[in-house]
Amino acid sequence: MIHMRTRAAFVLGLILCGTSTVAQEKPAVKLEVDLRDAAKRIYHARMEFPVTRGPLTLVYPKWIPGEHAPNGPIVDVTGLHFRADGKEIEWRRDLVDLYAFHCEITAGITKLEATLDYLLPTEEGTAGAPSASAKVAVLPWNLVVLYPDGAKSDDVKFAASVRVPEGWKFATALQPAVGAGRTDGLAEFETVSLTTLVDSPLLAGAFFKTYDLSPGQKPEHRLNIAADSAMATKISTDQVQHLRQLVAETGALFGARHYRHYDFLLAMTDHLQPNGLEHHESSDNRVPEKTFLDPDALDGFIDLLPHEFFHSWNGKYRRPAGLATANYQEPMKDDLLWVYEGLTQYYGVILASRSGFWTPAQLRETLATTAAYLNDWPGRTWRDLEDTAISSPLLYTARGGGASWRRAADYYDESTLIWLEADTIIRRESKGKSSLDDFCKRFHGTENGVIRIAPYTLNDVVAAMNAIAPYDWKKFFEERIHSHGPGAPLGGLENSGWKLVFNETMNDHQRAKEETDHIADVSFSLGFSVHGPGGDDASGVVDVIPGSPAAKAGLAAAMKLVAVNGRRWSPDGLREAISAAKKGKEPIELLVENEEYFQTVAIDYHGGEKYPHLEKTGGADVLSEIIKRQAAEVGTSK
Ligand SMILES: [Zn+2]
C-alpha cells in the first residue's frame, strides 16, 4: 500500500490477488451488499452459505493484503445474525480469536443466511480507516464478508452483487455476471474466488468520471474518479497524457502484464485518509478533493498512482513467500517489505519522473528531503531497517511524536536509496549495458496475461540480480537492511552524480508539504517540527529529534509552542528568529506550554536556517539517465 505519508513515507496498503475462475464443486457463497446508506456511513451485507450438518465457524478477514497487518476492522461489524429457514441460529464468538463466530448446523439445513452491518468510521483511529464520505463510497469487500474458518481464499467462491445509491456510478475490476443487467440499481458480478473478490474493491460516487488511458489498445486501462464535487473529477489533458505515458512506461519496463484490464480507482475527497492500496487489476487510491487543482497537494501525491500501479507486478504477481498466505486469518511475515514496498517506492518515484509528472528538479528536491531525514534521525542506532519492515503493523499507525527515535515505516523511503544504489551498481558493473530495469523485466515480466501469485525469497531476488550483473548482492542487501549507521545509505546518490547539501534556501518539496500539512519544519536547524496555527492540534510540537539543539534545550513532543523571542509564534517568525540568531550570541527563546505549566526553552543555536538539496558531485549524472522516458512519447489526442 502506500500513502499516508509520515514525513515522506507512505503508508500504502496492498492486497491480495488471485485467480478469477468460476466455481467448481462447491456452490458459491451469495453475497449482496447494499451501499444505499453509504452517506450515513453504514454498509449492509447479506450472505448465503451452502452448509451441512455439524459445527460451523465463520471468520471475518483479519490480515488484510497490502496493509500487511492484522487490522480487519472487527469492532465495527454489527447487527450480526445467522438464520436458516427463517429461524435464528445462535452464534458465539470464539474466546481467543475475536474474529471467529461459532454456530451449530442441525440436520436438514443446507443454507445459512448471515447478515451484518458494517459501521464506517468518519475519522482515522482504532476502528480502522473511513471508506465513505457523503458523496463517495469505497467498498473493500473484506469489510463485509465472512468465510468458513480454515478455507483457502482461493477455494471459496463468491457470487457478489451490489446496490449503490440512486444516481451514483461505480467501477470495479470485477466483470458483470454473464447475462446480468442492472435492474433496480442492482449490479451482479461474475463468480470469483474470495481472493479475487477481496482483490477487487468497488468505487462508487455521485460525481463520477472515467478516462481511457490506453485508447484503442488491449488490455484496457482506465482512470475512474469519484469525487465530492463534479469539478474535482475533471483533470487536465496534461495529466491524462502523463497517465497514458505511465501505462506505456510500464509496458517498456516489464514487457508483460498480469491483468485482464487495469482500473485506477481514485476517490477525491477530504473525508477519507489519503492512502493507496494495490490490487492485481486495480488500485484503491484516496486523495484530497482538490489534489489536481493545487500544485502543492499534487506534489505530495503524484507518485501515488505510479506506486500502486507498479504493485500489480511487484507485490501482487511477485510476492514475498511470507506474505503469500492461504487466507486472511493466517499471519503475514513482513520482513521482505523492503522489496515489496521498497522497490515499489523507488519505481513509483522513477516512473512519476519518466511519465512527466515530475520535473528532474522536483524529483531531486523530493529525494533530498528523503535522504536528509533518514540520515538525520537517530532511530537506526537501535532499530535496523529490517525491523521497521517486521514491525510494520505497529509502525503504520504510530503517532508522529517520537518518530525520529522510534523510526517510521522507513522500508519505503530508505529502500528508495538502497534500490537507487543497486541500480547504479548494475549500470557501473555492466558498463552501461544493463540496469535495474532489466531485473524488473526478468523478475516481474514473465507469464504475460497470467494472473497469479508467484512467491519469492530473498535468495530468488539475489539470484535474479546476479543474472543481470554479477555482484555480492546478498552482502549488499544484508549490510544495508541490518545497518545501524551512522547515517542513511547515501551511496546511490553519490554514484548517480549527486550529493546531499544544506543551505538557507527552502526545499520546494518541503515547502509544498508544509503548506498542505500545516506544519512548520525546522528539523535540520533547531531539530523539531510543529503544527502550524489553525487546524488540529495547533501549535503542538510534532517531534523533537534526540540530540538536536531543541532537544538539548528541553523541548519535547506534545508541548505547545506559544511564543518565539517574546512574540506570539508563527512559522515565518520562527524562521526569522533562526536567521537572526546566526548573527548574534543570544539563544532563541521559546515559550512553551506543557499541560497547565509554562516554561521557557532557550536554544543556543546560531547555525542559521538549513534545508536539504542535491548538488552535483562532478561525476556523471546517472540520475538523469535513470529517469529518462523509456517508451515512445504518447500523444495527447483522444
Ligand atoms: Zn505500496
Image (spheres, helix red, strand yellow):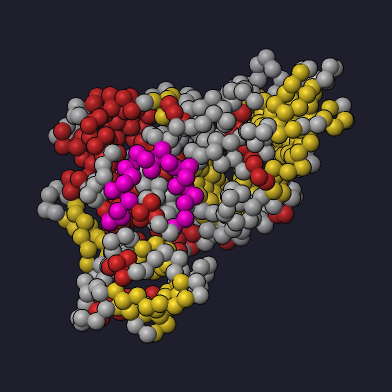
Q: Which residues are magenta?
A: 376-400
Q: Is residue 261 above or below residue 238?
A: above
Nearest to the observer: residue 42 or residue 248 = 42
* Magenta portion: prevailing SS class: helix
Q: Residue at x 11, y 53 (%)?
A: 618
Residue 171 falls left or right of residue 530: right
Splitting the image into 4 quarters, where does residue 438 fall? top left
Q: Is residue 475 visible?
A: yes
Q: Identify the residue at the far bottom of this view.
A: 566
Q: Residue at x 16, y 32 (%)?
A: 430
Q: Identify the residue at the far front of this view.
A: 597
Q: Residue at x 21, y 56 (%)?
A: 500
Nearest to the observer: residue 6 or residue 133 = 6
Splitting the image into 4 quarters, where does residue 8 fall? bottom left
- Tell how many labels: 0
Q: Identify the residue at the far left of this view.
A: 618
Residue 118 picture location, percent across and down? 70, 44
